[in-house]
Amino acid sequence: MELIEAIVLAVLAASTPLLIAATGELVTERSGVLNLGVEGMMIVGAACGFGGAWLTGSILVGALFGIVAGTLMSLVFALMALGLAVNQVATGLALTILGIGLSGLIGAGFVGERITPAVHLYIPGLTDMPLIGRVLFGEDGFVYFSVALIVGVWWFLYRTRAGLILRACGDNHVSAHALGYPVLRIRTFAVMFGGACAGLAGAYLPLAYTPFFIPGMTAGRGWIALALVVFASWRPGRLVVGAYLFGAVTILQLHAQGWGVGIPSQFMSALPYLATVIVLVLLSRARTGGSTAPAALGTVFVPDR
Amino acid sequence: MQLVLEKRAERSGTIALVSPLIAIGLTIVTMTILFAILGKNPLLALHAYFIAPLTDGYSLQEIAVKATPLVMIAIGLSLCYLANAWNIGAEGQFLIGAVAGSWIAVKTQGTDAGAWVLPAMLVLAAAAGALYALIPAICKVKFGASEILTSLMLVYVADLFLDYLVRGPWRDPHGFNFPTTAEFDPVATVPLLIEGGRLHLGSIIALLVVAAAAILLGRTIKGFEIRVVGAAPRAARFGGFNANQLIILTFAVSGALAGLAGIIEVAGPVGHLQPGISPGYGFTAIIVAFLGRLNPLGILIAGLFLALTFIGGEQAQIAMKIPLDVTKVFQGILLFYVLACDSLILYRFKLVFPNRQVARGTH
């Protein structure tokens, strides 16, 4: 029983950065912009987030540093992809390459340092309940925030006028423009939201997951978050399922290594990446009847005056 | 008053020529500021980065050695990008090529195997790289799965596979438990061009690849098809060109070139298989491809330039304690400026005055 509880807790912790980053990217892509720089924004968020927390001793300040860093990175992307109408795939790759270099530079000062990780909620009585107590009432703040975030995004996209306009930009930017909506401005906000989420997701890793910073600690999570958005068919509800499934794969392979299953650890470590490939293939195959992706995703838009 | 982007009537030839130079200039300005922020003398740092490596024979050879994998991979990637197929997993194809070729080297170690070993390694590495690149290509063509994500995921898989081999079955029994294979036998090593130097046969192969790509793109129907499918997919469909077939072809070629680059690196400058054989060649090659404007000759020049930044970065680290990550930042910023300047080939900036525009609209 304790083992099951421990596994569920670990799965939630491993899923949270994926969920936060993928939520941001979902909003970005729903506005019609494909930002492949999630990995780069995450790793800079991780470095800045840890730096903020290490300097001030506050996890909250660290998280804010991560958010600001991710947003600034996404603004560079917006300037290029929206302002200068550069190919979004190439710009996203450039953002990731830049981010990996920048994070190494920023993080060099505090490699090997440790901080006190984010505190977990504790409500006497509730948290002590067997099995579900710690899962429901004993998480760190990020986990609860990630759930609130995805619910908020669902509400925004499907229950507000602004969300409808954002989706309209993603499906047909020419029509949205003709109706008088400022397509590029809306997309810039969507890209910034994606950057803020990616920065926060990156900051989660050194602030709550492991209490130290190592270069390259995102280890492809940004790319998995991108795959999750495809997995979710660009829908918030499915994104939650996908993020927790991937978190489960990550944790199960770790436990399998611990149990001494006779498979080399490297093969188990490769599982999340292989699972991503297989899932992408299966989903894309099942969807031959027509794509669920935003129709204008990744296309350049230069308004004619 | 507002600054807006406007499509040019036709692409600007002047900007197409000078844009890489503008991009490099802007990058150097940005780097000067970055060096100053890091508290280093910008002039000395720039000298260490861009001038010092050009002043001694050893560094010049080292630049050619580093440019070899970059150019080979970037040529393959440029074919993909021209055909609008996004292979970003060249790093993985490079590693798989290195692993496949090393298999022969490891298995023939200490035997009296003859001169066939190295050619067999090269062929097997190219074949393995091509097959590895075909996984995302086939997933794309058959199932519609994003080749960007699948090709990138396979980089991590290749990295872990190499790690498993050199820590497990292929580890050198006399290697003091270091994760590496034994040094390759002389028959399994890429020969040097100058005795005692660094330059090896791989650089010649890279030059041949550049020439072959120039002929393919400039003189053959296949090359024409690749360019049309990327630039004008509708026209290509009317022309009866098979876009899916070209995705498969360009992925296979770029995978083969990356795999070949991988084994040349391992059997050449490195001499054995170990983790970390690539300082991100597969990703830097993406920058090389764009900086070279997806043109074979341009890629050759761009490859030499980025190799210079690798060597300069190492020298700046030794001489001025500038962190190696500065090189990655430099490369990232360079790609941004290249892409931004390229945008000005197709678009131009224009000042608009919203009030006057409304007046014009009411006519």
Image (spheres, grey):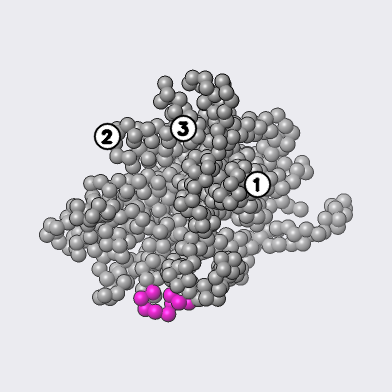
Q: CA distance from mark 2 to mark 1?
A: 45 Å
Residue bounds of the magenta highlight: B51-59
Please state if A292 lies on the left or on the right of B218 as rendered.
right
Residue drawn at 68 percent across, 48 percent down: A188
User: Are the residues flagged by discs 3 and 1 from a single subunit?
Assistant: yes
Q: Is residue B236 visible?
A: no
Residue holding disc 2: A262
Neighbours of disc 2 within 10 Å: few (<14), some (14-19), many (20+): few
Neighbours of disc 1 within 10 Å: few (<14), some (14-19), many (20+): many
- Label 2 sits on a secondary structure element that is loop
Q: Earlier in the sequence, mark 3 or mark 1?
A: 3
- Label 3 sits on a secondary structure element that is helix
Q: Amino acid at mark 1?
A: Met
Residue drawn at 29 percent across, 68 percent down: B201
- Which subunit holds the residue at mark 1? A
Residue B30 vs residue A183, the one in the foreground: B30
Spot occupied by residue B363 in the image (x, y as percentages of width and height) = 88, 53
Residue holding disc 1: A192
Q: Residue furthest front?
A: A124
Spot occupied by residue B259 in the image (x, y as percentages of width and height) = 34, 55
Identify the main secondary structure in magenta. Answer: helix
Residue drawn at 52 percent across, 26 percent down: A134
User: Looking at the picture, does residue B240 appear above or below residue B39?
Assistant: above
Q: Amino acid at mark 2?
A: Gly
